[in-house]
Image (tube, rainbow, N blue to C red):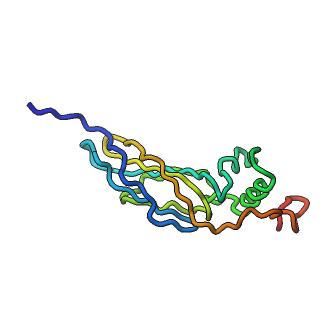
């Protein structure tokens, strides 16, 4: 008697780690899933979320409509308002994302990121039967290139119209 289990999505990739951390990027690496469950691997997906920039939580910094979260101090609000002005429309101020459809290797560079960005990420594999489980979350932080939160970054030389230094 021969028993065969049906094909299924793969288990989570193994040994998730970051190998190279720079000011504006993190290289994420992993190993193949332990069990492919009969289907050949066709893709990997890297999910990531920005947790903070420096010591300031990111989620409270960028809200719907661009308003700043209420839990921030005046100093933090000024800091993020200036960051948003400087990097308006820049991918580096996104909250996170998902990368898939082109990941055939066992690693991926997350970029562009701002310096001193703390993020968490996980990876999952896809075979011919579908997506498998995500790895456990791993946290990394880009190298610091940002100064400490300044006291009055937007006050000196600010215009009356914008409140920002031109």
Task: State the residue in front, 47 or 99.
Answer: 47
Instruction: Report the residue that reaches farthest toward the right.
Output: 160
* 35 to the left or right of 24: left
* 128 to the left or right of 135: left
What's the residue at 56%, 60% (across, down)? Answer: 141
- Name the spot of residue 69 as percent of width and height, x first: 74, 46
- Name the spot of residue 95 as percent of width and height, x first: 61, 51
- Name the spot of residue 147 as percent of width and height, x first: 70, 67
Rendering quarter of residue 133:
top left
- Name the spot of residue 79 as percent of width and height, x first: 75, 59
Rendering quarter of residue 144:
bottom right
Locate the N terminus by quadrant. Answer: top left
Q: Is residue 128 above or below residue 99?
A: above
* 162 to the left or right of 72: right
What's the residue at 70%, 44% (across, down)? Answer: 64
User: How many marks are shown on the rendered structure?
Assistant: 0
Locate the C terminus by quadrant. Answer: bottom right
Instruction: Report the residue that reaches farthest toward the left.
Output: 1
Rendering quarter of residue 81:
bottom right
What's the residue at 58%, 61% (across, down)? Answer: 113
Instruction: Report the residue that reaches farthest toward the top.
Output: 1
Task: State the residue in front, 118 or 64.
Answer: 118
* 144 to the left or right of 1: right
């Amino acid at each position: 008697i021969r028993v065969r289990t049906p094909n299924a999505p793969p288990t989570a990739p193994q040994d998730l780690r970051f190998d190279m951390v720079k000011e504006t990027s993190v290289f994420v690496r992993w190993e193949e899933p332990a069990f492919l469950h009969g289907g050949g691997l066709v893709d990997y997906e890297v999910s990531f979320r920005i947790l903070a920039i420096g010591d300031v939580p990111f989620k409270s910094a960028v809200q719907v409509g661009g308003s700043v979260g209420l839990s921030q101090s005046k100093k933090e609000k000024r800091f993020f308002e200036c960051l948003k002005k400087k990097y308006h429309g820049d991918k580096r101020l996104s909250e996170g994302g998902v990368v898939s459809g082109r990941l055939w290797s066992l690693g991926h560079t997350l970029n562009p990121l701002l310096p001193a960005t703390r993020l968490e990420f996980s990876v999952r594999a896809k075979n011919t039967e579908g997506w498998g489980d995500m790895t456990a979350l791993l946290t990394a932080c880009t190298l610091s290139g940002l100064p400490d939160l300044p006291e009055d970054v937007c006050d000196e030389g600010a215009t009356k119209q914008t409140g920002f230094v031109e």
